[in-house]
Amino acid sequence: MSVETQKETLGFQTEVKQLLHLMIHSLYSNKEIFLRELISNASDAVDKLRFEALSKPDLLEGGAELKIRVSFDKDAKTVTLEDNGIGMSREDAITHLGTIAKSGTADFMKNLSGDQKKDSHLIGQFGVGFYSAFIVADKVEVFSRRAGLPASEGVHWSSKGEGDFEIATVDKADRGTRIVLHLKSAEDEFADGYRLRNIIKKYSDHIALPIELPKEQAAAEGEAAPELEWETVNRASALWTRPRTEVKDEEYQEFYKHIAHDFENPLSWSHNKVEGKLEYSSLLYVPARAPFDLYQREAPRGLKLYVQRVFVMDQAESFLPLYLRFIKGVVDSNDLSLNVSREILQKDPIIDSMKSALTKRVLDMLEKLAKNEPDQYKGFWKNFGQVMKEGPAEDFANKEKIAGLLRFASTHEDGGEQVVALTEYLARAKEGQDKIYYLTGETYAQVKNSPHLEVFRKKGIEVLLLTDRIDEWLMSYLSDFDGKGFVDVARGDLDLGKLDSEEDKKAQEEVAKDKEGLIERLKVALGDAVSEVRVSHRLTDSPAILAIGEQDLGLQMRQILEASGQKVPDSKPIFEFNPAHPLIAKLDAEQSEERFGDLSHILFDQAALAAGDSLKDPAAYVRRLNKLLVELSV
Ligand code: ADP
């Protein structure tokens, strides 16, 4: 063993300590994945070397076939992994094996519940990578040297997985990384060729470079042990280059876990080879669960980019639109140059056409999932529905396709779950209904009971109930679906078109004429608070309602803008009253103008409350109401 210099002991970042602790306690039922994680890292390290060597061939240091070797020592109870990839410098080892670089990690840790089963799912999503070594080892040693550095600048990192790690500078002749796991005494079953081979076949068969194990060979009696011979145990070809028919589901699933750093199987995938003007292969996956950083702007996203089988970059974000940022996968192009950069990707017209083709692939895959596996799609929607709702605004060309993938809560489904597709809505629409009706609001409870729905309930017309923050904004980008326009039932003068019979319409006109006097009195009483007063056709049970002007901002958008400190254009609602309601009859008959004024303001405020809005002058409302209550009790 060579001399160690500059020996130091350093503490792990707090998040690493938490992760180590949790991992050891929640992943014990799936211990063998440590090997998959370490092989996955080794394979990434080789990919990086191959790529860097394109411009700096010296890094290959005279070659040697790129590979990963796994060996073991039954007596010493160790498992050793060795790769000849890019390696780590001393500084690399300190940062990469002592901290977690992902932004939002601290927040993520706070979300862990202490319930091991739940946490193991969360950790799976988060990806534990290197640290999974401590599931089976009570001491881990890493010997590494960054390609291009002299042999004297190797690094020896070692830790017991508790609070700290030791680091020293050592000689290392070969570039790359060797990891020695000192197995916990209960885990020595892993120091076994048969076991290791099975784990590698199970999880890492898809790794594109050879993974070698020592060949089992018994020393002949009386002879010295023969020199170690190695054999490749995995298939060692890039999975996406193989024909679809020859790749098993399990292989697709394991490959996904490798590239996505996910523990769970994906929901679906789409593997394609494109030939012709452009030549590329793509393998795209829909994860089963949203990552914890789905809504963090700076969170990494995008596909793994290969050019002619050579890894070029992780998180190439130019191949898919932002609203599909949760898609994981690989794209391997024959047309791009190997020294393509992120900047070039952003401008290259080749990328544009690949992007639109890949986007279609994803949308097709989701359509298929929705059609063939509706239950799985429900899960998908729960995890990614909010992000999909960004689609129509971002991706005009695919608006109709995306709209078909949206799911909504509705008056025709109990419980407020977002399960209704627009096609389904239209399929069960009323005869003569040529519109898609919806109502936006803050909570399901509020919209479900909104007076705006009264006439729809009476006529049995379905209304979509939209309560996500993004919904009103989304609807401003959707004008129609399958030729049917969207109508916000709280907006403008509700025209039910053919759903109202001729008699209905005639009756409405007559009532309006009949109530002209009342309308005028209300206009005076409510004054500036309203833009218009009219007879309502939407109400059956409530006395009055506030409608939003056709061009005005809805409540949700107004609240979002206000919360972000922006100035919101002033708009006044339309006051609509229900002529058949006894309170309105009473109002109409009221002789005292003072009482008439109080009562109309109370009706106005109540209508605002029912719409989920807050009152401009709550004290005045209470005063007026109390005044009436007192008179009532006299
Ligand atoms: P992740 O792989 O998700 O980044 P890990 O904890 O598995 O997280 O690894 C942290 C980092 O350590 C890697 O990103 C890489 O930079 C470095 N690393 C791990 N294993 C190796 C290896 N075999 N060779 C070179 N670098 C490695």
Image (cartoon, helix red, strand yellow):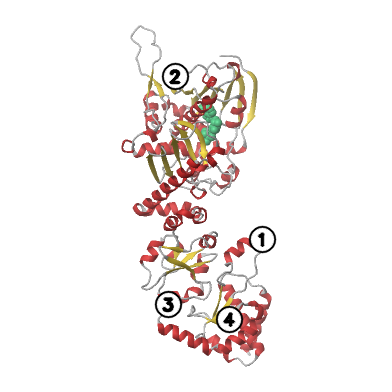
Residue 388: numbered disc: none
First reached walking from the N terminus: tag 1 or tag 4: 4
Residues at discs 2 and 3 in contact (Cβ within 8 Å):
no
Q: Secondary structure at mark 1?
A: loop
What residue sits 59% from the left and 80% below the top? 603
Q: Quadrant of the N terminus?
A: top right
Q: Secondary structure at mark 2?
A: loop
Q: Amino acid at mark 3?
A: Lys
Where is residue 513? Give x, y as percent. 52, 88
First reached walking from the N terminus: tag 3 or tag 4: 3
Residues at discs 1 and 2 in contact (Cβ within 8 Å):
no
Of badges 1 and 3, the one in the foreground is 1
Left or right side of 342 for 495: left
Where is residue 359? Give x, y as percent. 45, 47
Q: Secondary structure at mark 3?
A: helix
Does any portion of residue 287 appear in the rendered image?
A: no
Q: Residues within 10 Å of mark 4 (few under 14, many from 20)?
A: many
Estimate the spatial distance between the alpha carbons at disc 2 and disc 3, rounded to whole Å. Answer: 80 Å
Q: Amino acid at mark 2?
A: Asp
Estimate the spatial distance between the alpha carbons at disc 1 and disc 3, rounded to whole Å. Answer: 39 Å
Q: Which residue is mark 3?
A: 458
Estimate the spatial distance between the alpha carbons at disc 1 and disc 4, rounded to whole Å. Answer: 29 Å
Of badges 3 and 4, the one in the foreground is 4
Q: Which residue is mark 4?
A: 533
Q: Which residue is mark 2?
A: 75
Left or right side of 331 for 521: right
